[in-house]
Image: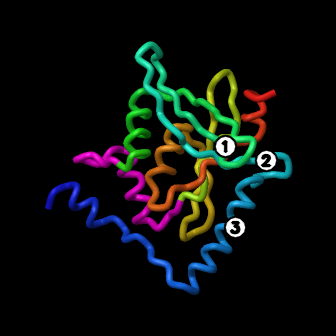
Amino acid sequence: MSDEAQIEANAEPAATVSAPDAEEAEATSEVTSQETTEETTDDTTVFRVMTVESVVFDLGDSSPQVHLMEKEAPYRHLSVPIALAEAQSLWAALNRVTGRRPSTHELTTAMLRRMQADIIAVRVLKVENGVFYASLDLMTPRGREEFDCRTSDGFILALRQTVVAPILCAEEVLANFYL
């Protein structure tokens, strides 16, 4: 069996929603969007839901940029510089491209899936001296776990999920760029 066929064979089938579950999913979606719009890890941090709009490769710049857009008004955007290898992996994740052999992010995604761990969210927590800091929030069979991660890795893993995990950005980070 080829590697691609093996990956596809191991992938979980897409979930189907019956009529009663559709109402529950819609209600959950509404609650989730309300919670994630102003989700807090403590009493002072407010998070905004962001989407990955694009990955920009500029030959004149050594760092590709990930462009994030706020999901709700005022639709602020944020450009995060990342390394070339991660930009290529992020582009592949954004476009649902898989390699002939699993990349590190594809392997990690497969491992998380097999261990029944779901990515709840990727949180962009702060920016210091031009470096963005993030955390990866997981729900495992043993409970919730949070891991410090590189922002680019968090974005890639979020996009590699069967259902794309939300990317949350601290209001404080956005406020640094929008006075």
Secondary structure state at the residue bearing disc 2: loop
Q: Which residues are magenta?
A: 97-118
Residue carrying label 2: 46
Q: CA distance from mark 1 to mark 3?
A: 17 Å
Residue 164, given in percent of the width and then of the height, sits at 51, 56
Mark closer to the chain start, 1 or 2:
2
Q: CA distance from mark 2 to mark 3?
A: 18 Å
Location of residue 148 by image quarter: top right
Q: In the depicted view, which residue is nearer to us: 72 or 179?
A: 72
- Give neighbour class at mark 1: few <14, some 14-19, many 20+ (Cα, 10 Å): many
Residue at x 38% of width, y 58% of height? 110
Colouring style = rainbow
* Amino acid at circle 1: Glu
Residue at x 33% of width, y 44% of height? 103
Q: CA distance from mark 1 to mark 2?
A: 13 Å
Q: Are marks 1 and 3 in contact (CB under 8 Å)?
A: no
**Given this view, does label 2 or label 3 mark the residue nearer the observer?**
3
Residue 21, given in percent of the width and then of the height, sits at 57, 82
Query: Disc count in the image?
Result: 3
Which label is found at residue 30? 3
Residue carrying label 1: 70
